[in-house]
Image (spheres, rainbow, N blue to C red):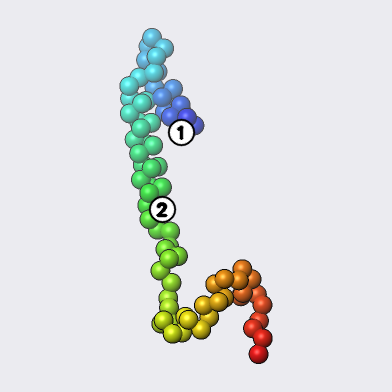
């Protein structure tokens, strides 16, 4: 946050050496835009909880694979 605000604040200095109010306004606008972009990026992350299912009976046949950490790496015994 400081890396964004400090250049915006110090870029606008008044004649007495203090930062102008305009620098704070620009800094907060930039932070607001960055926050909106971060929120948009968070919304675009896919939901992993909505997975396609083959139906209740199809999923029940492989239900024990959810209990084993390496179930996908080990082929089933026949």
Residue projecting furthest to the bottom: 78
Q: Position of residue 62 (x, y in %)?
A: 53, 80
**From the viewer's perspective, is the residue at label 1 or at label 2 nearer?**
2
Residue in the image at 35% along x and 39% along y: 32
Kindly state the secondary structure of the residue where label 2 is placed: helix
Residue 31: x percent and y percent? 39, 37
Question: Disc 1 marks which residue?
Answer: 1
Label 1's element?
A: loop
- Quarter where residue 24 is shown: top left
- Is residue 17 or residue 44 the one in the foreground? 44
Which mark is first along the chain, 2 or 1? Answer: 1
Q: In this view, does 22 lie to the left or right of 65?
A: left
Q: How many numbered circles does the render carry?
A: 2
Left or right of 61: which side holds 76?
Answer: right
Residue at the disc numbered 2: 42
In the displayed image of the protein, which residue is found farthest to the top? Answer: 16
Which of the 4 image quarters holds residue 53?
Answer: bottom left
Given residues 49 and 14, the one toward you in this image is 49
Neighbours of disc 1 within 10 Å: few (<14), some (14-19), many (20+): few
- From the viewer's perspective, is 60 left or right of 69? left
Please say if 8 is above or below 48.
above
State the separation of the CA atoms marked 1 and 2. 19 Å
Picture coordinates of residue 38, whole percent (x, y): 41, 47
């Amino acid at each position: 946050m400081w890396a964004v605000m400090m250049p915006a604040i110090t870029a606008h200095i008044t004649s007495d050496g203090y930062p102008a109010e305009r620098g704070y306004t620009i800094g907060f606008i930039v932070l607001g835009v960055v926050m909106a972009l971060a929120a948009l990026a968070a919304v675009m992350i896919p939901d992993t909880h909505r997975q396609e299912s083959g139906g209740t009976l199809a999923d029940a046949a492989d239900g024990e694979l959810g209990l084993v950490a390496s179930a996908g790496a080990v082929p089933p015994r026949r």
